């Protein structure tokens, strides 16, 4: 996860983190929290444990939680669209999910927080759209993880 983020930093808000989070959650369920929080910790270690990092303690867990709530027996034809859509919605809402902690850390009142969210909407739009299209990789990653699990066992 961390390496994919580093490799894709050239394109802001375009990354595979949602893809990996959804795929790991579908395959590993609760154990998906291990790679998610290893990623979060690596981000803090290599980029600094500062105010931008604090929301990372929960924003990826929100995506994990939503995927955990999805039915595991979805029809195969529906899965890609559902996974891509959940990934996209997380991207569209990223700034909104991020905002409450930023508001507390920077002393913003509610209108200030709303202004902060509004200022980030163009970035959230890019984030959501790119998450949707990157999301087409979720099912292949799930298949690769399941194949790897089968070969290891």
Image: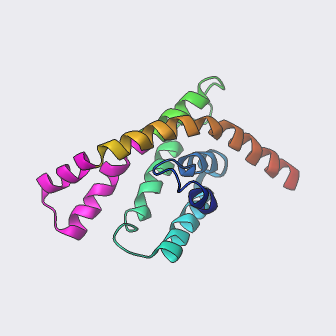
Q: Nearer the viewer, residue 4 or 24?
A: 4
On screen, residue 138 above or below 38? above
Quadrant housing residue 7: bottom right
- Left or right for 116, reference 44: left
Q: Residue at x 60, y 30 (%)?
A: 79
- Relative image position of residue 107 (x, y in whole percent): 16, 68
Q: Is residue 127 visible?
A: yes
Looking at the picture, how far across and down is residue 76, in whole percent? 66, 26
The C terminus - image quarter: bottom right
First to last magenta residue range: 91-119
Colour approach in the figure: rainbow
| Residue 153 appearing in the image | no
Residue 25 colored magenta?
no
In which quadrant is the N terminus drawn?
bottom right
45 or 28: which is nearer to us? Answer: 45
Main SS category, magenta section: helix
x, y percent for residue 19: 58, 45
Magenta-drawn stretch contains 117: yes
Q: Residue at x 55, y 35 (%)?
A: 133
């Amino acid at each position: 996860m961390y390496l994919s983020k580093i490799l894709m930093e050239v394109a802001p808000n375009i990354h595979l983190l949602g893809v990996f989070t959804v795929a790991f959650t579908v395959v590993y369920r609760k154990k998906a929290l291990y790679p998610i929080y290893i990623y979060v910790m690596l981000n803090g270690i290599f980029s600094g444990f500062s105010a931008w990092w604090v929301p990372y303690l929960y924003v990826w867990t929100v995506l994990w939680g939503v995927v955990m709530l999805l039915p595991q027996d979805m029809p195969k034809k529906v899965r890609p669209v559902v996974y891509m859509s959940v990934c996209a919605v997380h991207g569209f809402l990223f700034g909104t999910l991020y905002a409450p902690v930023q508001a507390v850390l920077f002393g913003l009142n509610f209108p200030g927080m709303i202004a902060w969210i509004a200022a980030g909407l163009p970035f959230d739009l890019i984030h959501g759209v790119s998450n949707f299209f990157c999301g087409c990789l979720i099912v292949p990653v799930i298949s690769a993880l399941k194949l790897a699990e089968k070969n290891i066992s």
